[in-house]
């Protein structure tokens, strides 16, 4: 089993990371992060399915098409999403990447870039270029290139996040110790005009780019794609995974091996932990809710029901008020588009059964209310139509969500 | 052109309506409405598409299958939705209908029933039966059976509504003056555990049941189905239309005549007016927003884009904050599932163009902010992909929405 340790993307030997302030955000807040590896990495990325995609995503997809076996760096800025900026956006992204490559003497097109923040405003490229030099100085000031510079990277990628989201894992691959580091951001999906879910994962396991991409896609499907703060999807949502191969463990080049299973499990644990941290820190959230839809006819229908419940403002406001309002839950299942049978649905808050066959069980309201007061709540919906399941994470909807998103400019 | 007059469902000669308090709600609030016609009416209904449907909807659908040419009454209660109440729900609905039929000496199965309010709690049938007797006394106390008893009907159907929603229209059919009356309720879709959009429309036009059903379906598609307060759909949503035929105008039995066109236009005006009133009174709403999606490839895609924008919490909170956040709007269009082309999208607040080809136009923020301060705002999104259009109504998302829906029990 992987062991969770206090760490981040730079906990993996050979990786270094730093965050600095380059002046995109006000008051010298950190807004530029740099992740660097001593050696070329196998790299994979998963990106938003929104038809509106930020310029850096176009750029990264191109770079990964040809150079997924030799990525050395990722540059990430907050405060400006470089989205809806027309033709100019992609050349700005390219210029930032080229600067990182020249500063750190990397092969051409081996740096990735990603941006999060306001939409529709051109990227302040000069500030970022100057910021990259500052980041280099900060890294150089340390005795070793891979020295830890604290949590500045995970702080620099925050927008409305209130806490850093990072962890590291240690596990074995064929008897060789391996490390995996991870950092993420994401609170509301969109703020001030657009923010984002971003994830960065590093490891010294050796994995071929193709297998790495498959593992990241598979894990994202059941973690980052199964969370919702407000149902909005940003044009910048991205998760990156870099594998340096320096651990000495044998290269994973197929999905059939025990080593692949061990690696994917560690990746799953890291991503699930980050996903839960993101939802728990959802804009204005006071409560993390795990929705378990069971008894579905197939995985897709279980997911549609879970997503419909997770995105219902009426369910989310009830959860905020600790109101055991199973009626709203059954109702959201009813309009999910899945042919649910209302008179077969059972609903549980924690272990308490509130509805059986679509009808109230008579369980004491006080007991339900106590369950709902918890900071972390499991809500189980049994469709009793089959054996497919889905786990989905969401949070409650509070006054603060409205405040954060309505009154940013005031 | 139809003339809008101050009125309601009982403004049509031959119809009477009354609202009383029967004790479902606290503090003698009106919670039972009765609509009665002196003669048998052609009747039509449109109902929620939620898989969870309240018991009265099952009951009404059955009655309308056989008796759509002779409906005499509709009983509506608020405070209890008679939904998710198991086998018992439908027999309770049937008992209420039977009581109305016996009290007013109507043919069997010519009374419809509908309920709105809390879900999962059995209908307090005894209270409603006693309330019906009270309603009869109230009607009898008036000099004539069709005498006006004020707005008590439209008050009795309110839940979280803050204002009554009603109107009447006068228009001509083949030179004969005809009246159409209408009342509706609907604020949040679900409150306290479930509330609802309900509409009641009366007329003394003569229309065959089949033509009446077609007209109501067509009009509902572009009015009640094109509004969203919070995206939640209730298991009780229903609109009823009764046509008594007593005006003396010729019977409309085909959709080809000029009279049909005139009738449908009047119905459309009534339903659109009610739809706007419902959205303007959305839970916590401070602003009515008309979303016009134009330039769509087909009507379905225009509607999907409009619905995605109307239901985005991030768009709705921005509208609350009077923030001209076109980025969130383009982003919601991007995840609508429609293959929009972001770099062709133009966005207007009122007549001000904020984005052209997916990029900010540079229009003065102050001018935009002034436009957004208005109580009624038109938001136009031009997809520039074709000529299909959709008009959709929504409202902003405020602190009060959260308060109303989170803290009902406290």
Image (spheres, coloured by chain):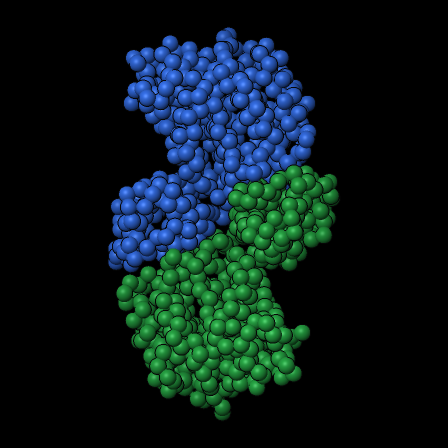
Chain colours: A blue, B green
Relative vertical location of residue B113 with respect to residue A305 in this rendering, above or below: below
Position of residue A253 in the picture relative to residue B379 (left or right):
left
Residue placed farthest to the bottom in the image? B143
Residue B162: where, in percent of width, then height?
52, 65
Residue B172 visible? The answer is yes
Residue A3: where, in percent of width, then height?
32, 22
Pick the front one: A160 or B203: B203
On the rendered image, what quadrant is the N terminus of chain B found in? Answer: bottom right
Residue B287 visible? The answer is no
Relative vertical location of residue A354 with respect to residue A29 in this rendering, above or below: below
Residue A297: where, in percent of width, then height?
32, 46
Q: Which residue sits at x=30%, y=63%?
A: B85
Residue A287: where, in percent of width, then height?
40, 42
Relative vertical location of residue B47 with respect to residue B171 in this rendering, above or below: above
Answer with the quarter of the image where residue B377 lies. Answer: bottom right
Pick the front one: A122 or A221: A221
Q: Which residue sits at x=58%, y=37%?
A: A52
């Amino acid at each position: 089993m992987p062991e969770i340790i206090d760490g981040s993307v730079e906990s993996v030997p050979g990786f270094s990371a730093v965050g600095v302030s380059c002046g995109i955000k006000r008051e010298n807040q950190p807004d530029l992060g740099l992740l660097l590896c001593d050696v070329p990495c196998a790299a994979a990325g998963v990106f938003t399915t929104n038809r509106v995609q930020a310029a850096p995503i176009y750029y990264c997809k191109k770079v990964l098409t040809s150079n997924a076996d030799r990525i050395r760096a990722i540059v990430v800025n907050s405060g400006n999403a470089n989205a809806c900026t027309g033709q100019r956006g992609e050349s700005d992204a390219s210029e930032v990447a080229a600067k990182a490559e020249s500063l750190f003497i990397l092969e051409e097109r081996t740096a990735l870039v990603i941006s999060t923040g306001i939409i529709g405003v051109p990227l302040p490229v000069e500030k970022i270029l100057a910021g990259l030099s500052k980041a280099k100085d900060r890294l150089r000031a340390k005795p070793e290139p891979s020295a830890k510079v604290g949590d500045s990277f995970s702080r620099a990628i925050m927008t409305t996040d209130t806490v850093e989201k990072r962890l590291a894992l240690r596990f074995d691959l064929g008897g060789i110790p391996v490390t995996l580091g991870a950092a993420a951001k994401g609170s509301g999906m969109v703020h001030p005009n657009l923010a984002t879910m971003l994830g960065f994962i590093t490891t010294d396991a050796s994995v071929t780019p193709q297998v790495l991409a498959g593992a990241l896609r598979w894990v994202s499907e059941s973690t980052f794609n199964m969370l919702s703060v407000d149902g909005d999807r940003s044009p910048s949502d991205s998760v990156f995974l870099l594998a340096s191969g320096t651990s000495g463990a044998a290269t994973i080049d197929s999905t059939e091996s025990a080593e692949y299973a061990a690696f994917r499990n560690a990746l799953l644990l890291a991503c699930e932990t980050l996903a839960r941290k993101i939802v728990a820190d959802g804009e204005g959230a006071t409560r993390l809710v795990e929705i378990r839809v069971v008894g579905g006819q197939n995985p897709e229908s279980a997911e549609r029901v879970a997503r419909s419940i997770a995105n219902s403002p009426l369910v989310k406001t009830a959860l905020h008020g600790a109101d055991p309002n199973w009626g709203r839950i059954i109702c959201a299942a009813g309009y999910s588009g899945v042919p649910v049978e209302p008179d077969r649905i059972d609903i549980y808050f924690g272990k308490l059964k509130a509805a059986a066959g679509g009808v109230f069980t008579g369980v004491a309201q006080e007991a339900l209310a106590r369950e709902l007061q918890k900071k972390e709540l499991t809500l189980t919906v049994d469709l009793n139509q089959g054996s497919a399941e889905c786990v989905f994470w969401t949070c409650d909807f509070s006054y603060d969500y409205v405040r954060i998103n309505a009154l940013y400019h005031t």
